Every structure is written in C-alpha cells, then in structure tokens.
Amino acid sequence: MKRIGLLLIALGFLAGAWLAVQHPTEVSWAWFVPAVALGFVGVALARMAERSTASHSETLRSNVGQLEQSIATIIAEVSRLDSDKADTHVYAFPTIIDERIVPHLNAFVAVRDAMKTAYGLQVFARVMGPYAGGERYLNRVWSASADGYVDEAHAYITKALEQFAEAQSKLVAARG
C-alpha cells in the first residue's frame, strides 16, 4: 500500500506540474485539481501504510528495543570520547564521531517514530528535545575540532553527553 501511495504522490504532483506549465496564463482547473488531489490521496495512503507497519506489535517492540539500544550505545561512545578527550588529538574528533557515533545516531532516528506509537507524542517530544540538543552539541564538537578549537570541542563533548543522558532517562521513564 505504501508503494501505491508513493506512486500516486508522484503521478499526481507530476501531472499537476505538467498541467500548470501547459498554459501558464490560464490553468485548466478541471484537470489540475484532480491531479493534485490524486497526490494528496497518495500521501494519505503512504501515511496509513506507515502507521499500520509501525503499530504492528512485534515491529513496535523491535523498534523500541532499537531505540533503547541505540541511545545506550550513543551514551557509551560519547562517554568514552569524553573520558579520552584529553589524550585525543583535536583533529581526530570528526573521524571518531563519524565512525563510532553517527551510525548509532542514524539507527535511533530511523526508528524514532516508534516512540509516538508506544508512548505518545508527549514522550516523543520530551525525549527528542534533549536528543536533538545532544546531536547539535556533537556537531559543535565536530566543527570546533575541525577548526582546532580544543577547549570548545572538549566542553561540548560533555554537554552532548549530558543531553543524551537526559534523553535516555526520559525514554526509560516512559517505559515505566
């Protein structure tokens, strides 16, 4: 159903765009509106398919487990980076972040919608706020490191760790 939805999105909006450029001064509304409506029907179908997949209990359990595992690994890696920061050359931080932390950030983000289904939108917002802060601080570490600013890189590693720890504690609290 998701593929059909995506196909309808593409067809509807491409048809709408094609119709819009055929006669730039006057649009044939009788054809344009149904074409765009077809795209919106596709959006609805794709979203329904995604919700149905996300709410399947086994998938949901697996995704929630992935969330918990990813945030735990992120914290472990950022903690390791924090404890080793004095002995790590400043220009090595971007490579370390890219190799050891980014895959786990991506894994977390890939299944983050499971939080909405499992715990609700309030929990999602409470977890994603500090999580996004941790990501921003890691980006600051990466940038400061690439520019050779040792003190700033060191300070933001600690701040990133605090944010990820807060996100994890809110995720664990939601599980109850």
Image (tube, rainbow, N blue to C red):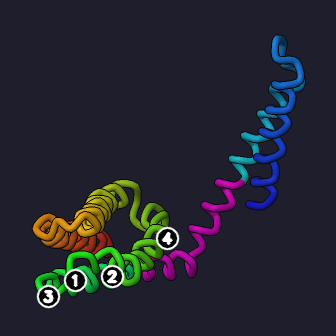
Magenta stretch: includes residue 101: no
Which labelled disc corresponds to residue 96? 2
Kind of residue at disc 2: Ile
Kind of residue at disc 1: Leu
Q: Earlier in the sequence, mark 1 or mark 4?
A: 1
Could you say where residue 166 lies in the image, as x and y percent from the top left?
Answer: 20, 68
Q: Residue furthest top?
A: 25
Q: Earlier in the sequence, mark 2 or mark 1?
A: 1
Q: Earlier in the sequence, mark 2 or mark 3?
A: 3
Which labelled disc corresponds to residue 111? 4
- Badge 3 vs badge 1, beta-carbon distance below 8 Å: no
- Residue 143 vs 75, above or below: the answer is above
Judging by the rendered image, the residue that carries numbered circle 3 is 87
Residue at (46% x, 72% y) in the render: 106
Residue at (84% x, 30% y) in the render: 34
Q: Earlier in the sequence, mark 4 or mark 2?
A: 2
Please state if 159 lies on the left or on the right of 115 as rendered. left
Q: Quadrant of residue 23?
A: top right
Judging by the rendered image, the residue that carries numbered circle 1 is 81
- Residue 54 vs 90, above or below: the answer is above
- Badge 4 vs badge 3, beta-carbon distance below 8 Å: no
